[in-house]
Every structure is written in C-alpha cells, then in structure tokens.
Amino acid sequence: MRAVRYHLARTLGAKTVIGTASSTAKLDFIRSCGADAAVDISDASWPDRLWETAPGGVEMVLDAVGGKVFDQRMELLAPLGRMVTYGAISGELPSIGGNGVFSLRYITGVGLYNWRQVRPKEARQDVAEVSRLWQSGDLRTAIHGTYALTDTVAVHRVLDDRANLGRLIAIP
C-alpha cells in the first residue's frame, strides 16, 4: 500500500510527500517510492522531525495506525488540514477529544465498503481512475514477495514480523 500511496499523492498534485515508518528498511523503501522525506516513528521525537520538514504543519494525513500515533498526527496538521483515518493497526481506535473537534481541522474515517454503499457511482469512477493510472504506468505498486496459496504460513510470518515492503501475493 505504501508505494501506491506515495505515487498516487504525487500524481494527484501533492507538492511534498512525507512518509512514516519504524524501521530503516521501511524508511528507505518509502524514499524509493517517491516520498520527499521519511520520518522514524519509533523515535520518541519523531513529531519534532516532522515539524522540521513541514514547519507550518501538514495539509493532509493518512492514518492506518490509530491510538497515540493518530493523536500525534492530529497535532501535526496545519490549520484547516485534513486527517483521513482508515484503520487501527495499533489495536486502538482513533478518538477525538473536545480540542480536536474545535481545532479547525477536518477529520474523516474511510472504509471502501461504506464508500461503495453510500456513493456507488463515485466509488466506481474512483476505481476506474486508479485502474487507468495503474494501466498507464503513472501509478506503481511494489511486490514484496509471491507465495503459493498453500504457504499462507509464510505470508502471515512476514505480516506478523511487519517485514513486508510492498504487496504479498498468494497464487493458487
């Protein structure tokens, strides 16, 4: 997903793309995917590193982590910035306190199933546009590894170790 996010952000006109990760390999991968900067969130001072890169705050944050990282990323938003949350891999759902509600920031949660249910025409158009970008080569994805469908144990080992740098493909 990371590779697609960075290429899609750039394709859609983002001026500066900043990625976050918690290992040297993933930080290098983020840079190789086109991010202008990569910040190590395992370093307690990572918000300071991000402020150095974007002194006025960031215009948009995509968050799949939730919990404390969600809260920290909220603080990094520029006035009228946008936070899009689409997961909680930390195991903690995002929560927004009173200060977040009145902070001149936009916050939304996204789920593809709900998007398709609420706005099916727009969802189809979005999927068609992303498909067109991929087919034209303007949007790329990285494949970490290809596995036999019978070897799902290996796939889960990579996922559990949080070692994947790109998609894991299981082939029947």
Image (tube, grey):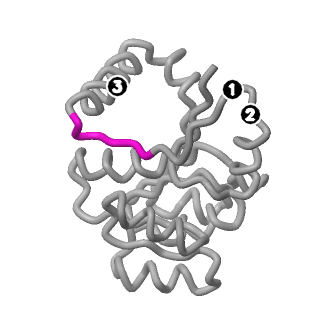
- Disc 1 is placed on an element classified as helix
Which residue bears the numbered disc 1?
Answer: 149
The mark lying in front, picked from 3 and 2, is 2
Residue 127 appears at what percent x and percent y? 37, 23
Determine which residue is flagged by label 2.
Answer: 151
Residue in front for this viewpoint, 36 or 110:
36
> What is the distance, in whole Å, between disc 1 and disc 3 at their CAs?
30 Å
Q: Amino acid at mark 3?
A: Asp
Would residue 80 appear left or right of 97 to someone viewing this image? left
User: With 154 as the anchor, is 25 left or right in this view?
Assistant: left
Magenta span includes 41: no
Q: Disc 1, disc 3: CB below 8 Å? A: no
Decide: few, some or many residues near mark 3? Use Cα within 10 Å; few <14, some 14-19, many ≥20: few
User: Which range is magenta?
Assistant: 137-142
| Label 2 element class | helix
In the rendered image, residue 84, in percent from the top left (x then y), is placed at: 50, 48
Please report whichever mark, 3 or 2, sits nearer to the chain's N-terminal start.
Answer: 3
Separation of marks 2 and 1 at Cα, in angstroms? 5 Å
Residue 40 vertical placement versus 58 (above, below): below
Residue on which disc 3 sits: 126
Name the kind of residue labelled 2 in the image: Asp
Instruction: Relative to 152, say whether 73 is above or below.
Output: below
Against 11, is 56 above or below? below
The alpha-carbon separation of the residues under discs 3 and 2 comes to: 33 Å
Residue 137, image quadrant: top left
Q: Which residue: 43% across, 46% down?
A: 142
